[in-house]
Amino acid sequence: MLQSNREMFASVSLDTPHEVIDETNRGGKDANQEANTEVIIQCMKLALRTSLSNVSMQQKERPLNPTTDFVFKAKVSFHANASKSGGCCSAAPLRDTESSDESDDGKRDATPPFDFTDYAPMCYRHIREFLGVEWQHFQDVLVSSRWHSIPTPGKSTAQLFFCGQNWVVKTMTKEESKFLRDILHRYYYHVRDNPHTLLPHFVGHHSLSLAIDGTQKKVSFVIMQNVFATPNKIHEKFDLKGSTVGRYAAPAERRKQTCTKKDLDINRPIRVGNVRRELLLGQMRRDCDFLKKASIMDYSFLIGIHRCDGSAASVARRLVTEDERCFTADQGGMLSVPGPHGEREVYYVGVIDILQEYNLWKRSETAIRGIVNDASEISSVHPREYAARFVDFMSSIIV
């Protein structure tokens, strides 16, 4: 997968690689693309309200059926319908539904008919329960909040929308969507057994099919928790892979306030203390073992650093938590041990971009890049080697 990260994206990919909605430009064609993005958002909100209400009903609570629930697809068609409630679309056969975001009332009138697919809805209901997600609040945030996106570094054509503080919606390629469905059974049991996993907390997987500018498009997207789910300012960010070839932020990137630094840019430790270090690396090893067995590589360790200013309001009491809950115990992150001058930081961490399979394309990249570079230092290596190098690198900076 082309480089991306979970806290910053721009550009919607609608299954057509060169058809990108760029919200940084505002004239002519770009204004039309922005309007198309808004239509997609309204369709998503309408469908998510219906689907979440449906699967989360108390009477539907039941154990997971591993034979059918991992592959089940719930498909709903939303068609034009001038209902009494004023909504522009209704779901068949479900009853009419409208967004609770009153500020979007006018925009709903332009929502076209569309088809919605909810992948493995009962499976994701269970995952939300594993992670302690209260479904009604989750639904309210997705449906009622404004969805915001910001420009993406790198070459990714995905778009990531922020929904409230805790949730993000990321568009996916067809290959990523299929791969997530292929590994869902493994992911489900890993999250069940590791509720404090550092892996992305995927809590929903869906697709829309609708007409955009007279052409039928399909948009796949996944919903996940935001690594930086905090009101604290993130002063510094790192996207680390454990490789060194080309792994530095370009000068133009460094000038940005939202700069994300890379492996060759980090020259400082992440100070969590001995107990938390072992907990953090232990969970990382378990997560990397899952990724290795699923033939996944090219993932990153995302670190956001909030520098405490020393005030009573800024430095929270470091909670004595001797299990994996410590990853989010202090202001939603991990409060550091004191630095050389008594300074404190809060770290927000997670493993991101886990949907790149080591496929034929990546095997070819390994062979070609290995000719002109040290094969052990390039990003594209076998999942077994990638996981070992990844853990070794993180072990060297976490103290």
Image (cartoon, helix red, strand yellow):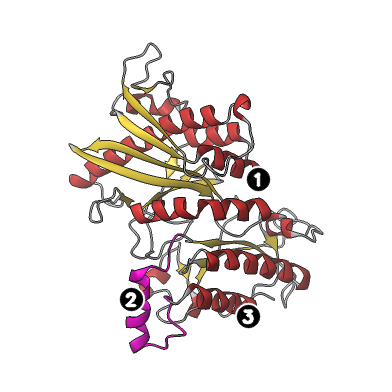
Query: Does the rendering let one see residue 195?
Result: no
Q: Is residue 398 left or right of residue 355?
A: right
Kindly identify which residue carries mark 1.
130
Q: CA distance from mark 3 to mark 1?
A: 32 Å
**How many neighbours does mark 2 have within 10 angstroms: few (below 14), some (14-19), or many (20 or more)?**
few
- Quadrant including the C terminus: bottom right
Where residue 49 sits in the image (x, y, percent)?
Answer: 48, 29
Mark 1–mark 2 CB contact (< 8 Å): no
Q: Is residue 354 left or right of residue 325?
A: left
Q: Determine if the magenta segment contains residue 6.
A: no
Count of labels in the image: 3
Compared to residue 365, the image places residue 97 above or below, namely above
Q: What kind of element bears circle 1? A: helix
Badge 3 or badge 2: first in the primary sequence: 2
Label ID, residue 336: none
Where residue 394 sits in the image (x, y, percent)?
Answer: 60, 75
**Which amino acid type corresponds to the residue marked 2 in the rendered image?**
Ser
Q: CA distance from mark 1 to mark 2?
A: 38 Å
Q: What's drawn in magenta, residue-wise?
A: 355-380
Kindly identify which residue carries mark 3.
396
Where residue 100 sits in the image (x, y, percent)?
Answer: 47, 25
Q: Is residue 238 left or right of residue 87?
A: right
